[in-house]
Amino acid sequence: MKKNKLILTAVILLILSLAIGALTGCSGKTNTKAAGSGAVVVESEETADTGKSSDTSSDTGGSEPFKINIAVDSGTFAYPFWVAQNKGILKKYNIEAEFQTYAYGIDTINAVQLDQADLGEAMDFAAVSRLGGASELQFISFIAGNKLSGSELYVLDDSIKEVKDLAGKSVVVQKGTVNEYIWAQLYAQYGIDPASVNPLYISSTAEGLALVKSGEADAIWAGGDTSAQIEDLGGKSLGDYSLIGFAPQGFLMLKKSYLEKNEEGIERLLKALKEAADAINSDQHEAAEIIKDNFKIPAENIEKVLKNTIFDIRFSEEDFNQLDSVTKWSIENKLIKYDFNVKDYIYLNPLQAVFPDTITYKE
């Protein structure tokens, strides 16, 4: 009888042991497997279920997140950044970005100069206007550019029939931006004495619209969503950038000291922005839907802007030539106070590492 009790007890203990083992195996918290040496390795739930290593490094992003403070404008050139953020592309490349939004590209470059941001983006004239002297700024890539159809010259005074009639009129000028360069080009090409024009300087698009509404402004350059508003206020177009044969191009800029310490992270950022630019180019409707909430304007208005904009991560011979010609003309015409060679402010190591085929510029 005693022997039978011992056998029954052993059976009960065996059943309990098997039951506990089954419960542990189904919990998904841990799992075991035999290693080559015969040892037992304990894996996390994620590793056991997926068969992947717990190492977070990958082909797209390093094991450590790249943290960067990015200054963007409130317009077109910010679009690739918001697509990269909202579409999860920055996360894919293990990039943690903080964004600061400014009215114009020149403001983003000023933020980088003052160490308030790590990266900025601006159109050619605004960008080169901050070079020379002790500037540490460097161009690392083209990011976006207007087509000739990207902006139009609107007039609000019926007496202005052609460009030369702007003499004696009041025009809206975004001081320190490429808009200032565009007006200067217009005056030079159409024989208008700049001193005969009354510039109304603004620091935001809203200010320009207010001047048009109040009747103070006789002429203004406008594109995208702003064009429709100017037309609703009675504005008539004299033509687009074809009037001067120049369309602004935008570039990414960082300080050289920052670049030299963060090249691997910047390489990842260029990959992310290239993917975002390609996404915009392949489906402008989807891109507009992705970023509309960042600008609080209808997606269809954003889509109109996208059609007049070129997005890419590259640095071509044409990109350099534009920067060089803008620099030389601006220095010669006293729009820029320093004399310098723009070649000294180009840093393409990160771009060369990830997209060498996109570089056609030859030093």
Image (spheres, rainbow, N blue to C red):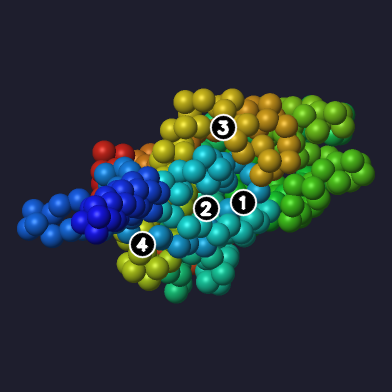
* Residue at the left extreme of this rendering: 37
Residue picked out by circle 3: 287
Label 1 neighbour load within 10 Å: few <14, some 14-19, many 20+: many
Q: Helix, strand, or loop for circle 1?
A: strand
Q: Helix, strand, or loop for circle 4?
A: loop
Camera-side mark, 2 or 3: 3
Task: Tell me the distance, in whole angstroms, between the alpha carbons under discs 4 and 1.
Answer: 28 Å
* 347 sits left or right of 79 in the view: left
Nearest the viewer among 295 and 90 is 90
Q: Are marks 2 and 1 in contact (CB under 8 Å)?
A: yes
Residue picked out by circle 2: 121
Question: Residue drawn at (32%, 59%), measured in percent from left and top?
Answer: 63
- Residue type of the residue flagged with mark 4: Glu
Nearest the viewer among 199 and 308 is 308
Using the image, tell me which numbered label, if any, was put on residue 64: 4
Q: Earlier in the sequence, mark 2 or mark 4?
A: 4
Task: Tell me the distance, in whole angstroms, between the alpha carbons under discs 2 and 3.
Answer: 20 Å
- Residue type of the residue flagged with mark 3: Ala
Q: Earlier in the sequence, mark 2 or mark 1?
A: 1
* 29 sits left or right of 191 in the view: left
Residue 224 pos. (x, y %): 68, 33
Label 2 neighbour load within 10 Å: few <14, some 14-19, many 20+: many
Residue picked out by circle 1: 73
* Residue at the bottom extreme of this rendering: 134
Where residue 176 sits, quadrant-wise, is bottom right
* Residue at the right extreme of this rendering: 214
Camera-side mark, 2 or 4: 4
Question: Residue drawn at (36%, 58%), measured in percent from left and top?
Answer: 265
